[in-house]
Image: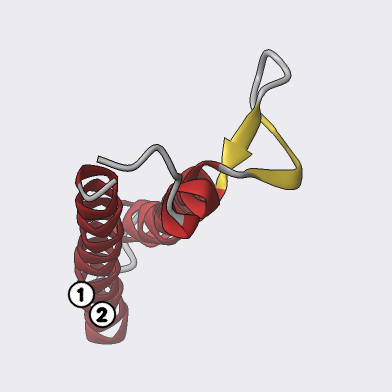
Amino acid sequence: MSNSVSPLSVLATSPLTGSQRPGGKSSSWYEAMAEAWGKTLNAKANEIEVASDQLAEGNDRPEHITRMTALAQQMGFMSNSAHTSLQSVGTALETMARKQ
């Protein structure tokens, strides 16, 4: 087994310029990708929440219900995409770590 470090493992753990976690530690690009997905999903969830509040206030026209359905479908698609991308990259990093 070699003591050299693969370029992918260095990239996965390398700090991002200007990105800091609480406590002053730099985050990796993989963590930044997960945080970006989280922020995107939160934004979509907030859209759904606003539309849901409007529905609860009596805005139950078909166009609004259709919009709610579309938002829910978008959220499902984005959630699946986030899971797939994070799992794929995580698996690739795990594979590279085992080959070192």
Question: Which residue is located at x 73 percent, y 19 percent?
Answer: 24
Residue 12, image x, y percentages: 47, 49
Amino acid type at mark 1: Gln
Q: Is residue 77 visible?
A: yes
Residue placed most toward the observer, 47 or 3: 3
Whether tag 2 and tag 1 are in contact, CB under 8 A, the answer is yes
* Image: 65 above or below 45: below
Q: Which residue is mark 2?
A: 70
CA neighbours of label 2 inside 10 A, class few (<14), some (14 to 19), many (20+): few
Q: Residue at x 34, y 67 (%)?
A: 59
What element does badge 1 sit on?
helix
The disc labelled 2 sits on which kind of residue? Ala
Q: x and y percent of residue 64 in the render?
A: 31, 77
> Dot 1, how many residues are within 10 Å of its Cα: few (below 14), some (14-19), or many (20+)?
few
Is 20 drawn above or below residue 59 in the view shown? above
Circle 2 sits in a helix, a strand or a loop, which is it? Answer: helix
Report which residue position mark 1 lands on: 73
